[in-house]
Image (cartoon, rainbow, N blue to C red):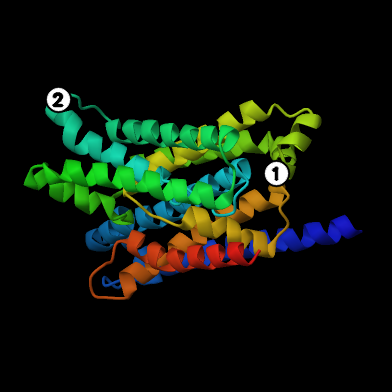
Amino acid sequence: MNQFNIFSKELLIILFLLFLVVLFSVFSLFYGDAGVSIKDFINSFHDEYINNVLYEIRIPRVLAAIIVGAGSALSGLLLQIIIKNPLASPGTLGIDNASVFGANLALIILPSLGLNFNYLTSFTSFIFAIITQFIFLYIIRYKSHKPFIIILLGVAISSIYHAGTMLMQTYAEDNTLASAIFWSFGDLGRINYNEILIIANILLFSLIFLSYHLWDLNCLYLGNIDAISLGVNVKNIYAACIIISCLNTSVVVSFVGLIGFIGLISPQISRMIISVRLQYYLPVTCLIGSNILLLADILARGLTSTTIPVGIITSFFGAPVIIYLLVKEVEL
């Protein structure tokens, strides 16, 4: 009976979050300078202007917010599980800046060397993200696993990558520099359907893979020693989580730019409202990430007459959360 009650409560939370995703999505579709009503939506096939607003601008933006938010939240959740640190996220561990460095390398340096192909930005972002993640795993395994050491290391690595990015941009040509800077802000408005499909497929593959390893992840959440004693191949699960986290982070950064803090905030909110059993914790965290980014995008378009890059909005909300978590860590 207890299990049924817990399941019912958690199922209701998932359904409520799904309802919020639909609600924010519908509101986002019809909200903006170009007034679009439900009647306009129904008649959109007969009106070229409304058709362009909906199908070329707003629907891709809404789909991107849902998928990018879920993928970013998933990346943060996996990092927190394998590093055993509630402050771990692609942003605090320097993975975001590593991806940005890789992307700038593809945008500024590699084309001048004659190296240019489709999704080069995604490839270089992923390479630098995964290199950074393995550095952290080495430090945690052989040097120190203290939370503050990990976070300080993340700050140091972020600074190195940020300095490298600034150095490349210093010597970039004006057109290339403008493109790189605008890209790094984090904006959902630039994404197209093909890129949405790529991110969605990677997210779907990640969720399917993780759903087959929920028991392993639940054991891993208890600790490495317990997981090993229960027969979990910890090294393989670690490697899979690293690849999934870095892959989701790098494609998001390469297609929409830097959108920070969702990977940090979403698991924290999820932990406050639901149990940490991964069969519930994982979907709730992803849905919270989608809702946060949908809401942030609505604010980005509504706070001023000019659309603010959504990465700026998430940073304004995310920075206080890090401060709160750090203060809480000190009190403990």
Q: Residue furthest right?
A: 1
Q: Residue at x 46, y 40 (%)?
A: 248
In the rendered structure, the answer to whether residue 130 lies left or right of residue 173 reads right
Q: Is residue 254 visible?
A: no
As rendered, which of 133 and 305 lies closer to the eye?
Answer: 133
Q: Residue at x 42, y 53 (%)?
A: 63
Indicate the amino acid at tag 2.
Leu
Residue, disc 2 = 113
Whole-percent x, y for residue 176 in the image: 13, 43
Element marked by disc 2: helix
Q: Residue at x 75, y 30 (%)?
A: 228
Whole-percent x, y for residue 156 in the image: 39, 47
Q: Residue furthest left?
A: 174
In the rendered structure, the answer to whether residue 6 lies left or right of residue 313 reads right
Whole-percent x, y for residue 212 in the image: 68, 34
Q: Residue at x 36, y 72 (%)?
A: 37
Say which quadrant the N terminus sits in.
bottom right
As rendered, which of 31 and 163 lies closer to the eye?
Answer: 163
Packing grade of label 1 (10 A; few <14, some 14-19, many >=20) is: some
Give the Cα separation between the discs numbered 1 and 2: 45 Å
Q: Is residue 49 visible?
A: yes
Whole-percent x, y for residue 272 in the image: 66, 64
Q: Is residue 295 above or below residue 162?
A: below
Q: Earlier in the sequence, mark 1 or mark 2?
A: 2
Packing grade of label 2 (10 A; few <14, some 14-19, many >=20) is: few
Say which quadrant the C terminus sits in.
bottom right
Residue, disc 1 = 221
As rendered, which of 165 and 66 lies closer to the eye?
Answer: 165
